[in-house]
Image (spheres, grey):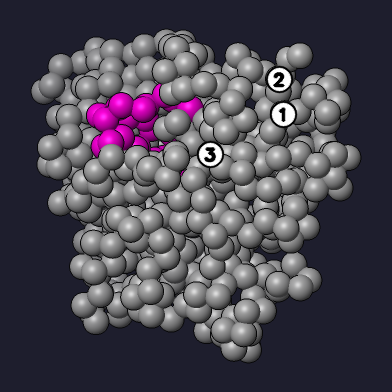
C-alpha cells in the first residue's frame, strides 16, 4: 500500500497543508492567507483563532483535492513560524491575548533593561541567542504584565504558553497534547541548549512560571494524535520542527558545514555545525537544528526580518506592481548598478546588526529613478542582507561556498543569479522548494519508519538549477559598499532619533 504524509506548514502570512507521497512528490496542497494586525508602530499580531481555522480548513481542502481517504494518511508533520507567542486558557483553549508575532518589537526597552542589568552574557551562553524582542520570552513576559490577572493565573497553572506548534497540537488534539520540539524550544530564550531543558535561572530572569511550559520532545517523536474532528480519523503527529529547521532538514543539510537559506517573509540562513554548538563572535545565533534520538544537532543562523515582505510592501504599500511575479521581468530590464539602495528595516535590522529601533529607507534617488529601479533595489536588498550574514559567518571561521535556497523568492531566477553574484558563491535550488514542509514530512516519516535513515533522505534530494557568479570581485565589492553606506545612514538616523 502506498504511504502518504500530511504536513501542516503554518507560516507568518498563511497556513498551508501539503500531502506528500513517500518519494517526496506533492500529491496535493492547499493554502489560506490570514490577516496581519499592526496595532502600534513595530507591533505585529495575529488572531490565534485565524491560525487554527486556516490550518483546519487547508487540511480538509488538501485531503479532498488529493482524492485520498484519511485512512491512507500514515502520519502528520507540523512546521511553523517560530518565536510567535500565544497564551491560552487551560480549560477553554481561548487565547487571553492576540499572538505576538516574531517580527514584533514592542519589548525592545525590556530587552535593553535586561542588558543593562548584565543578563545578556548568561542568556547567550545558555540559549545561544541574543537579548532581542525577536524571541518568545520577553513577549510572554509582556503578556503576563499587561493582561490583568494573568500572572496569578499562570502561577496557578490555569494558563498555557506555546509557540505556534504547541498551540496547534493542543487544539488539534483537543487538549491531549501539550508539547513542543527542541528546535522550537531553542528559540524561546528559556531553553538551555546544552542541557536540553527549560532553564530555571532563565525563567527567573524573565519572571516566567515553569507551570506554563510544554514538554520538550525530539523533532521526530510520538507527539500524540490529531483528533478525528479534523479529518474524520485520528492521525498520529510524528514530526515537529520550526520552519527554518525543517527547511535545513528538507534540504538534506545533514553534514557539518552544509547551509541553506530560506526566502519567505524574512530570510534565514542556517549552517549545520554538527553535534557541538559553536559560539558566534559576530552576533549570529546558535540554535538546535533538530534533535533525533535525544541527540541534538546544532546550527549557526543569521536572521533577516524582511525579505519577501519587501516585495509584498512594494505591491501592497506602494502599489508599484499588481503581482509579485512581475518583479523578475522588471529587474531584468534594469542594470544592476542603477545606484538605488533600499534598506527594508520596517521592523528593525536583524543579524548581524540587531538594531530593533532602525527603520527603513531608500537612497540614491534621482530624477531618472523609476519603478524598475525601486523594484530592483527591493530584490537586491535581500541579496545584500544575505551577504551581511556570509561576512559574519566568515568572521566565525565558517566559509560559505555553496548555498541551498528555498522559499517563495527562490522561484525568481534573476534574484538567485544576483545572489550568486553578490555572494561570490554557488547557489542551488532544489526540485522541491517546499523544503519546510518536506523537511517535517521526512521527520514524521523517519518516526513512522517510512524512511530508514538520513542516508536514504540524502539520496532523495535533487538539484533543479545551479547559479554561479558572473561578475568579478571588484564589481561585487563596489555594489556591496553602496549597501553598507546605506545601512550606515539608517543607523545614523536611529542614533539621531534616540538622542
From mark 1 to mark 3, how far is it between C-alphas?
14 Å
**What element does badge 2 sit on?**
loop
* 52, above or below 47, in the image: above
Identify the magenta region. Answer: 250-274
Badge 3: residue crowd in 10 Å (few <14, some 14–19, many ≥20): many
Q: Name the residue beneath numbered marker 1.
A: 74
Question: Which residue is pictured at 71% across the width and 40% down the height?
Answer: 236
Q: Residue at x 58, y 67 (%)?
A: 161
Q: Is residue 80 above or below residue 132?
A: above
Residue that mark 2 sits on: 3
Residue in the foreground of this view, choosing between 154 and 364: 154
How would you rate the neighbour count of disc 2 (Cα within 10 Å): few for under 14, some for 14-19, many for 20 or more?
some
In primary-sequence order, the first of circles 2 and 3 is 2
Marks 1 and 2: in contact by CB < 8 Å? yes
Q: Secondary structure at mark 3?
A: strand
Q: Position of residue 104 (x, y in %)?
A: 48, 62
Please identify the quadrant where the C terminus is shown.
bottom left
Q: Badge 3 is on which residue?
A: 220
Which numbered disc flags the more N-terminal residue, 2 or 1?
A: 2
Is residue 399 visible to the viewer in this orientation of the structure? yes
**Exactly how many numbered labels are in the figure?**
3
Mark 1 vs 3, N-terminal side: 1
Q: Is residue 273 located in the magenta-colored stretch of the structure?
A: yes
Amino acid at each position: 500500500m502506498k504511504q502518504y504524509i500530511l504536513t501542516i506548514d503554518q507560516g507568518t502570512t498563511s497556513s498551508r497543508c501539503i500531502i506528500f507521497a513517500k518519494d517526496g512528490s506533492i500529491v496535493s496542497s492547499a493554502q489560506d492567507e490570514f490577516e496581519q494586525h499592526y496595532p502600534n508602530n513595530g507591533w505585529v499580531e495575529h488572531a490565534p483563532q485565524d491560525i487554527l481555522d486556516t490550518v483546519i480548513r487547508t487540511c480538509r481542502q488538501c485531503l479532498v483535492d488529493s482524492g485520498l481517504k484519511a485512512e491512507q494518511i500514515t502520519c502528520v508533520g507540523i512546521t511553523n513560524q517560530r518565536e510567535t507567542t500565544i497564551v491560552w486558557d487551560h480549560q477553554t483553549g481561548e487565547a487571553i491575548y492576540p499572538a505576538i508575532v516574531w517580527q514584533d518589537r514592542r519589548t525592545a526597552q525590556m530587552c535593553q533593561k535586561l542588558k543593562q542589568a548584565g543578563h545578556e552574557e548568561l542568556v547567550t551562553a545558555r540559549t545561544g541567542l541574543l537579548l532581542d524582542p525577536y524571541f518568545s520570552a520577553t513577549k510572554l513576559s509582556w503578556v503576563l504584565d499587561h493582561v490583568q490577572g494573568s500572572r496569578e493565573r499562570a502561577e496557578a497553572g490555569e494558563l498555557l504558553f506555546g509557540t505556534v506548534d504547541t498551540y496547534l497540537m493542543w487544539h488539534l488534539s483537543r487538549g491531549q497534547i501539550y508539547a513542543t520540539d527542541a528546535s522550537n524550544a531553542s528559540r524561546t530564550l528559556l531553553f538551555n541548549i546544552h542541557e536540553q531543558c527549560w532553564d530555571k535561572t532563565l525563567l527567573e530572569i524573565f519572571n516566567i512560571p515553569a507551570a506554563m511550559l510544554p514538554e520538550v520532545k525530539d523533532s521526530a517523536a510520538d507527539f500524540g494524535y490529531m483528533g478525528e474532528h479534523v479529518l474524520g480519523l485520528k492521525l498520529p503527529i510524528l514530526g515537529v520542527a520550526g520552519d527554518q529547521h525543517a527547511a535545513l532538514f528538507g534540504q538534506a543539510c545533514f553534514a557539518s558545514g552544509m547551509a541553506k537559506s530560506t526566502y519567505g517573509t524574512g530570510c534565514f540562513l542556517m549552517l549545520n555545525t554538527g553535534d557541538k554548538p559553536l559560539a558566534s563572535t559576530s552576533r549570529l545565533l546558535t540554535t538546535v537544528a533538530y534533535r533525533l534520538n535525544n541527540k541534538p544537532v546544532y546550527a549557526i543562523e543569521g536572521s533577516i526580518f524582511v525579505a519577501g515582505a519587501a516585495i509584498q510592501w512594494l505591491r501592497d504599500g506602494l502599489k508599484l506592481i499588481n503581482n509579485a511575479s512581475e518583479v523578475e521581468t522588471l529587474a531584468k530590464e534594469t542594470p544592476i548598478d542603477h545606484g538605488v539602495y533600499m534598506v527594508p528595516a520596517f521592523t528593525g535590522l536583524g543579524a548581524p546588526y540587531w538594531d530593533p529601533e532602525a527603520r527603513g529607507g531608500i537612497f540614491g534617488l534621482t530624477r531618472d529613478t523609476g519603478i524598475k529601479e525601486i523594484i530592483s533595489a527591493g530584490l537586491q536588498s535581500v541579496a545584500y542582507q544575505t551577504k551581511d550574514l556570509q561576512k559574519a559567518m566568515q568572521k566565525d571561521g565558517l566559509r560559505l561556498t555553496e548555498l541551498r535556497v528555498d522559499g517563495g523568492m527562490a522561484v525568481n531566477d534573476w534574484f538567485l543569479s544576483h545572489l550568486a553574484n553578490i555572494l561570490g558563491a554557488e547557489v542551488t535550488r532544489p526540485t522541491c522548494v517546499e523544503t519546510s514542509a518536506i523537511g517535517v514530512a521526512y521527520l514524521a516519516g523517519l518516526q513512522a519508519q517510512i524512511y530508514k535513515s538520513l542516508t536514504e533522505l540524502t539520496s532523495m534530494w535533487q538539484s533543479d538549477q545551479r547559479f554561479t557568479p558572473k561578475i568579478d570581485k571588484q564589481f561585487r565589492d563596489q555594489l556591496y559598499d553602496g549597501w553598507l553606506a546605506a545601512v550606515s545612514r539608517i543607523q545614523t538616523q536611529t542614533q539621531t532619533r534616540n538622542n
